[in-house]
């Protein structure tokens, strides 16, 4: 790469000079993460094919699966097992569970330990009704005693590090994350990730970094990972400086820019940030993602599963109606290869479509809370 392609960031040099408060490696119990930049779970997106497509870029400290229901896992539900499918290259991996029963959560954690994951993560932040109506996800923040008992059962059931991902609190009047983080640390939780919003906020409004800082200050030694709206190296730098967090978890930013972990690692070691990926590199990434799917599932199943991702790639890559319709209806690997060939040829002839650099929005629950 030509040096002229490297864009120095002022904040990078400042950050290095200031010697950021957090270590570059993060310790979670007996596990040391080689990078403090982690992939936050995005149900439906951050599955094994996606993780395998981004891992070779480097810089990723830990990835987490979609949330899965503890009871469904113990039942051996095929859909649940698919959601947490992994392989040796997909390492280190945290499997995220949710549930309302301590014994089931503990048994699910043991299952996870026996099946080779590195970390058990407890979901305490999911705001959607399907999850909270059973006292799970963010609703755990409303019942401190039950929650602490349940988390302790999970911690005691396994040797693996147990982490918790939570929001700042239920609403602005109940910012209980500092309390929970402190209590969790006492009962042996190895780390916490904080999405800097309340359940009442959903995905709206600004991330409250001051709130995350209070969680960092509430614990003595376990790492806190700051989460929410991190899209660039500068965002991450800001999050780490303002909160003192030991690491970050990036969700939508990684979907928008699968190179973000590699960029962060480069930023940390060299103080420079690569220019954003080109349109062609994004097509290559989509191809890699698709081919991982086809290696992991039979052809028909892979093509069906790809439809959700295809929707996303069409939003991001704006191929136009005709190519979009074809991509969404892919049934065979050969069809995908042919379509991609035409797509690349068109880009060679005409250049990328106008406006492709504008980042699309990722669908999140919206409207009144009761309807999430
Ligand atoms: C589509 C979608 C799915 C999500 N799925 C999960 C999940 O399964 N488990 C979880 O803890 N958080 C989940 N989240 C929350 C994210 O992990 C993250 O906390 C939130 O999106 C804010 O971070 P970001 O701005 O980096 O995406 C999801 C968010 C979105 C948008």
Image (cartoon, rainbow, N blue to C red):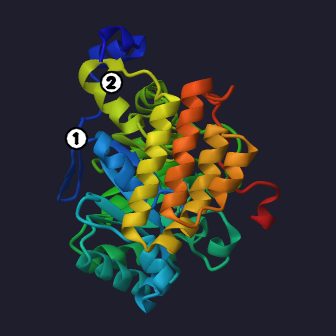
Task: In the rendered structure, find residue 267 and report the number of the disc placed on it.
Answer: 2
Apparent side of residue 176 relative to residue 284 in the rendered image (left or right): right
Which residue appears at 52% of the width and 69% of the height?
144
Which residue appears at 46% of the width and 81% of the height?
70
- Image location of residue 180, percent across then percent down: 46, 59
Query: How many angstroms separate mark 2 from mark 1 (CA)?
Result: 15 Å
Q: Using the image as rendered, state which of residue 211 and residue 125 is in the foreground.
A: 125
Instruction: Kindly tell me whether residue 351 is visible in this rendering.
Output: no
Q: Element at badge 1?
A: loop
Location of residue 44 with respect to 149 vertically, above or below: above
- Image location of residue 185, percent across then percent down: 33, 59
Q: Using the image as rendered, state which of residue 24 and residue 93 is in the foreground.
A: 93
**CB contact under 8 Å: marks 2 and 1:** no
Q: Quadrant of residue 139?
A: bottom right
- Mark 1 sits on what residue? 25
Q: Using the image as rendered, state which of residue 247 and residue 39 is in the foreground.
A: 39
Task: In the rendered structure, find residue 291 and report the number of the disc placed on it.
Answer: none
Instruction: Kindly tell me whether residue 276 is visible in this rendering.
Output: yes
């Amino acid at each position: 790469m030509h040096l002229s392609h490297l864009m120095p960031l002022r904040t990078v040099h400042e950050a290095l000079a200031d010697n950021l408060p957090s270590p570059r490696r993060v310790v979670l119990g007996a596990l040391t993460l080689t990078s403090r930049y982690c992939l936050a779970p995005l149900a439906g997106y951050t599955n094994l094919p996606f993780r395998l497509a981004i891992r070779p870029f480097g810089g990723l400290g830990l990835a987490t699966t979609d949330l899965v229901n503890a009871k469904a896992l113990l039942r051996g539900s095929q859909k649940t097992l698919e959601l947490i499918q992994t392989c040796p290259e997909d390492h280190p991996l945290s499997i995220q569970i949710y549930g309302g029963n301590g014994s089931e959560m503990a048994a699910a954690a043991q299952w996870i330990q026996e099946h080779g994951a590195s970390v058990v993560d407890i979901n305490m932040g999911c705001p959607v009704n399907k999850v909270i109506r059973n006292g799970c996800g963010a609703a755990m923040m409303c019942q401190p005693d039950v929650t602490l008992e349940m988390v302790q059962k999970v911690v005691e059931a396994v040797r693996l590090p147990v982490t918790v991902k939570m929001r700042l609190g239920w609403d602005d009047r109940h910012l209980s994350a500092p309390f929970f983080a402190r209590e969790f640390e006492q009962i042996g939780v190895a780390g916490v990730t904080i999405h800097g919003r309340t359940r009442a906020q959903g995905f709206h409004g600004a991330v409250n970094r001051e709130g995350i800082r209070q969680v960092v200050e509430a614990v003595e030694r376990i790492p806190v990972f700051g989460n929410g709206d991190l899209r660039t190296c500068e965002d991450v730098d800001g999050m780490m400086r303002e909160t003192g967090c030991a690491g970050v978890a990036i969700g939508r930013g990684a979907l928008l820019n699968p190179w973000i972990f590699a960029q962060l690692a480069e930023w940390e070691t060299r103080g420079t940030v690569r220019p954003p990926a080109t349109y062609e590199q994004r097509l290559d990434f989509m191809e890699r993602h698709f081919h991982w799917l086809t290696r992991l599932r039979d052809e028909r199943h892979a093509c069906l599963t790809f439809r959700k991702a295809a929707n996303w790639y069409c939003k991001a890559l704006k191929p136009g109606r005709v190519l979009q319709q074809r991509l969404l209806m892919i049934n065979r690997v050969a069809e995908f290869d042919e379509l991609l060939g035409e797509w690349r040829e068109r880009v060679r002839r005409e250049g990328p479509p106008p406006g492709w650099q504008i980042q699309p929005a990722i669908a999140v629950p919206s409207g009144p809370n009761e309807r999430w």
